[in-house]
Amino acid sequence: MKTFIVDAFTTEPFKGNPAGICLPDHALSDAEMQAVAKELGFSETAFVMRTDRSNIYDIRFFTPKSEIPLCGHATLGSAKIMFDLTDSEEVHFINIQKLDLKARKSGSQIVMEFPVYDVIPATVPQAMLSALGIEEVVNCVFNIETHILMLEIASAQTLRALSPDYSALVKTHDSIDGVLVTALANDGKFDFHSRYFWPWKGTNEDPVTGGSHTFMAKYWSERLGKTQMKSFQASERTGFMDVELISDKTLLIKGNAVIVFAGEMKISQ
């Protein structure tokens, strides 16, 4: 099986978010895809399968622990691979929810179309704040579609310095996929910063999370009165993207990706 590693939302190798991109030449079982994702060990691995329609592919995403319906950086990585292997200018990925994740070239970057989601008010357990090392929050909301709890805090500097106790964190909630912490930027280069922790469903920290922008972009758009914004993820690897709300249902995510490995994986003897 052709297999790639793509660093997404970065212009530099070994930065951004690494994704495994697999191109099976025959149907794999769920157990096989889960085993491959666990073997690669990245926050997500995408499996891209051809359909009988030109430039349209089925796509599924697996963390080392489970399947998830939507992943921004693995979609970006998949688009990078398909543009590298074909002369296409635009591709469509159909996920398990039958969403059409469209991606197109834009100079050296790739522009993806993602859905826009709302958030609802929520409360954060004190034990979670303690595990994260956060003393107080500006706001707490929840996104139903991704099962992500989002906490806005007052300081981007505090955000960068967070060092969660993951063994304690995973015990503080039993019905979320992860917790996203975000803050207003103070560097003059970006509009907002974020970090995403998800020991419940994936890895301890996801380096750069495109999928969280399905609701975070609208949240900050309403706060800042802007539809075009620059986002920075303050993980150890760091990463960045441009986001633009073009309607109340559609979000554009624009970013770069770098292929760092191409090879073949033997999935049977």
Image: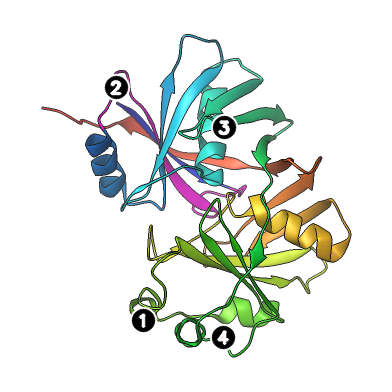
Q: Residue at x 38, y 51 (%)?
A: 42
Q: Return the residue at label 3.
A: 99
Q: Amino acid at mark 4?
A: Ile
Circle 2 residues within 10 Å: few <14, some 14–19, many ≥20: few
Q: Return the residue at label 1.
A: 168
Q: Is residue 197 above or below residue 49?
A: below
**Viewer-side label of 4, 3:** 3
Q: Earlier in the sequence, mark 4 or mark 3?
A: 3
Q: Return the residue at label 2.
A: 27
Q: Are marks 2 and 4 in contact (CB under 8 Å)?
A: no
Quadrant for residue 59, please give it. Answer: top left
> Could you tell me what secondary structure mostly forms the magenta stretch?
loop
Q: Secondary structure at mark 1?
A: helix
Q: Return the residue at label 4.
A: 134
Residue 235 visible? The answer is no
Part of the protein shown in magenta: 9-29
Report the Cα–Cα distance between label 2 and label 4. 45 Å
Report the Cα–Cα distance between label 1 and label 3. 35 Å
Q: Amino acid at mark 1?
A: Ala
Report the Cα–Cα distance between label 3 and label 2. 20 Å
Instruction: Locate the N terminus and report the quarter of the image it occupies.
Output: top left
